[in-house]
Amino acid sequence: MRYREVTLRKINKLVWGLLILIVGLALFFRNQNYINFQLKRINDANSFVKFPNYNDTVTEAEDGLQEVTNPKSNLVLVNKERKLPDEYEPPDLIYPIVPLHGVNKEKTLMRKEAAHALENLFERAEASGVKLTPVSAYRSLDRQQSLYNYYIQIHGEDWTHSFSAVPGTSEHQTGLSIDVSSPSFGNKLEQEFGETKEGTWLAAHAHEFGFVIRYPEDKVELTKYNYEPWHIRYIGKKYATYLYKNDLVLEEVMKPKNN
C-alpha cells in the first residue's frame, strides 16, 4: 500500500513537472514569435521607406544657405538651412474642393496630389463629426516676404524667427503645406488648437492621408520652429505613416553627412 502511494506521488510530481515545462515552453515560443514579428515589421518598414539623401539634394547658395535641387519632390526638405530656388513656383497648383467656412479661397491653392489628399482628409473628418478649415496653403515668394516683414514690425525678430520662415525657406511655397484650423476655434492659428477636438483628430489621422504635423511640440530643437499643431505637410501616405509610427520628423530621416 505504502509503495503504491509513493509511486502515485512520484507520478503526480512528474505530471505537474511536465505541465509546467510545456506551459513555460509555450510562453517562451509565443514571446519569441511576437519579438520576431515586431522585428520583421520594423525591418519591412525600413526596407520599403527610403527618403532622399540630404547631401545629394542641395547645392550651396550665394546667401550662405543651401538650395534644394528637388523642389518638385513630395519629399523636398525645406527648412531654415535649405531654401527653394529663387522664384520657384509649383507647376500644378489647384484649389482643393473643401468647405471654406468663411476663409478666402485664394489662399487654399495646393499642388494637385496634395489637394486631392486634403479633400479626402476633410471628407473623413466631416464623417467623424470634425469640421476643419483650410486657412492658408501656397504662398508665393513675394507673399511670404510681405508676411515676414509684417511679423517683424508687429511681433519683433525673436517671435518671427520662431514662427515664420525667411522668404525662400517656407514650406508654403512648395504648395505641399497648409495651415488648418476649425470654425469652433474661430479659424485661428494658435497652439491651443492642438488641444481641441479638431486638433487632436488631425494629429491622430493626418498620416492616413499622407500628411504630417510638420512642427511637433517635442521636436522644436530639430525643426527650429515653435510648435504649430495647425501646420500640416503632404509627403505621401507611406512616408507620413512611417514618420508618425516612429515619432520622427523630416530632419531626423534626412540628415547631412559630414565629408
Image (cartoon, rainbow, N blue to C red):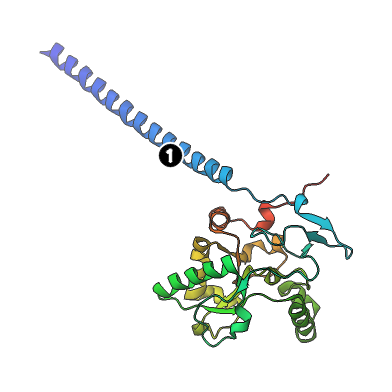
The structure residue drawn at horizontal position 62% and vertical position 83%, both measured from the top left corner, is 106
Can you name the residue that lies furthest to the front here? Answer: 91
Place residue 232 in its image quadrant.
Answer: bottom right
Quarter of the rendering occupied by the N terminus: top left
Mark 1 highlights which residue?
A: 34
Which residue is rendered at x = 77% and y = 73% of the image? 161
Residue 246 higher or lower than 198, as above or below: above
Q: Residue furthest right?
A: 62
Is residue 131 shown to the viewer in this render?
A: yes
Quarter-wise, where is residue 110 in the image? bottom right
Badge 1 amino acid: Tyr
Instruction: Give coordinates of residue 112: x percent, y percent.
Output: 58, 68
Q: Residue at x 68, y 72 (%)?
A: 172
105 versus 174 height, above or below? below
Query: In the rendered view, would you say 58 is above or below 199?
Result: above
Q: Quadrant of residue 166?
A: bottom right
Asked if one can make out residue 201 in the rendered structure from this viewpoint, the answer is no
Determine crowd level at label 1: few under 14, some 14-19, many 20+ residues with C-alpha closer than 10 A: few
Farthest left residue in view: 1
Q: Position of residue 98 (x, y in %)?
A: 50, 78
* Quadrant where the C terminus is found in the figure: top right
Q: Is residue 217 above or below residue 101?
A: above
Tell me residue 65's x, y (percent).
Answer: 84, 62
How many numbered discs sit on the rendered protein?
1
Residue positioned 52% across, 66% down in the render: 117
Relative depth, front residue between 19 and 53: 53
Q: Secondary structure at mark 1?
A: helix
Question: In the drawing, does residue 126 fall left or right of residue 23?
Answer: right
For this rendering, which residue is in front, 47 or 8?
Answer: 47
